[in-house]
Image (cartoon, helix red, strand yellow):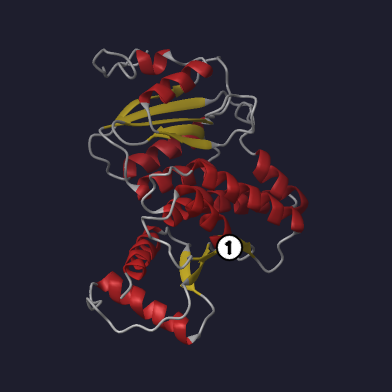
């Protein structure tokens, strides 16, 4: 068996088992002989029953569809023939990714197509060159959360406005409520799990939480929203039974800058939820929104030892 096929099965298996309730991965076209063979191979790989050197004759690459419960839009992914080859350059890999992922739907408008093409291109540009599983990272950490967000918007605003809302959701605005905003901060030993990161992105979208997660070591989570939404967000995080997780505070947000997180500053179209990789980025972001003391006085981003007290 080609080492590329094994590598592709590994990533497809990872993606399949990372899906949340209401999400699905299927091979396409259905009932095609090679589609059936790919389904059989993935099932055997997942169960650990795949022979070391099975006799395989495949003339086409796997093509999959990743869907949510809303049937309006889904992603279709066609893996390139040399996908998984470590010798492929970063620039070539990005070209492959651009052509590998597309939007499908029964009634997708031209405007929606253009919006999603931009979202996919932006996600690819943000993908690190050291990503071990680029398709998995794109679908799981970037595109599926945006699709859930799109479905939520589409259910609450006229269809003609949904794609525009998706583009600009997360602009520089305060929490859209007459209630004073609340905010919460968590710290943990680490934040690595793709499932936890997916959950945070999904909950932030469902609950209209603006915030960020600092991945790696240590893990840091900050969110702002209405009191009700923040309390539910906090409860969801606690329910994951996260070892070494500390709730630093859950309280009304101060009357400082109330804008949403971004890597590039408040003048750009900002996202609802972002991820940072370095503690310095967290401090910079909290400084930008006028809340630097909430992390620095705990020892986050300073030479001091983190304390359990809040500012």
**In-image side of 138 versus 259 (left or right):** left
| Residue 112 placement: quadrant | bottom right
Up/down of 72 relative to 56, above or below:
above
Q: Nearer the viewer, residue 87 or 144?
A: 87
Q: Nearer the viewer, residue 239 or 35?
A: 35
| Residue 102 placement: quadrant | bottom right
Q: How many marks?
A: 1
Up/down of 16 relative to 38, above or below:
above
**In-image side of 29 versus 52 (left or right):** right
Q: Nearer the viewer, residue 39 or 230?
A: 39
- Residue located 64% across and 63% down the image: 72
- Residue located 47% across and 73% down the image: 61
Horizontal and vertical percent for residue 132? 36, 51
Horizontal and vertical percent for residue 258? 58, 21
Up/down of 248 relative to 208, above or below:
above
Horizontal and vertical percent for residue 166? 65, 45
Up/down of 272 relative to 73, above or below:
above
Instruction: Give the structural element (helix, strand or loop) at label 1.
Output: strand
Q: Nearer the viewer, residue 148 or 215?
A: 215
> Which corner quadrant holds the C terminus?
top left
Q: Which residue is mark 1?
A: 74
Label 1 CA crowd tier, 10 Å (few <14, some 14–19, many 20+)? many
> Which corner quadrant holds the N terminus?
bottom left
Q: Is residue 228 visible?
A: no
Q: Is residue 9 visible?
A: yes
Horizontal and vertical percent for residue 113? 69, 56
């Amino acid at each position: 068996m080609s080492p590329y096929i094994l590598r592709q099965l590994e990533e497809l298996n990872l993606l399949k088992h990372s899906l949340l309730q209401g999400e699905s991965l299927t091979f396409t076209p259905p009932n095609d002989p090679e589609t059936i063979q790919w389904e059989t191979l993935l099932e055997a790989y997942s169960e650990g029953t795949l022979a070391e050197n099975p006799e395989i004759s495949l003339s086409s690459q796997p093509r999959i569809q990743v869907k949510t419960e809303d049937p309006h839009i889904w992603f279709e992914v066609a893996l390139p023939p040399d996908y998984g080859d470590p010798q492929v350059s970063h620039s070539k890999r990005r070209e492959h990714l651009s052509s590998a992922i597309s939007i499908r739907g029964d009634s997708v408008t031209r405007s929606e197509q253009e919006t999603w093409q931009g979202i996919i291109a932006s996600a690819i540009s943000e993908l690190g060159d050291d990503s071990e599983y680029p398709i998995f990272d794109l679908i799981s950490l970037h595109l599926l959360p945006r699709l859930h967000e799109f479905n939520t918007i589409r259910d609450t605003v006229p269809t003609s406005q949904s794609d525009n809302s998706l583009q600009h959701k997360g602009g520089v605005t305060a929490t859209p409520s007459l209630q004073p905003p609340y905010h919460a901060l968590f710290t943990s030993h680490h934040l690595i799990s793709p499932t936890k990161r997916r959950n945070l992105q999904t909950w932030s979208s469902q609950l209209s939480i603006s915030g960020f997660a600092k991945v790696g070591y240590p893990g840091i989570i900050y969110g702002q929203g209405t009191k009700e939404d923040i309390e539910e967000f906090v409860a969801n995080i606690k329910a994951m039974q996260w070892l070494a997780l500390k709730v630093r505070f859950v309280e009304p947000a101060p009357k400082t800058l109330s804008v949403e997180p971004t890597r590039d500053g408040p003048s750009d179209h900002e996202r609802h939820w972002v991820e940072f990789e370095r503690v310095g980025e967290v401090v910079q972001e909290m400084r930008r929104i006028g809340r630097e003391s909430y992390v620095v006085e705990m020892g986050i981003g300073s030479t001091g030892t983190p304390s359990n007290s809040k500012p």
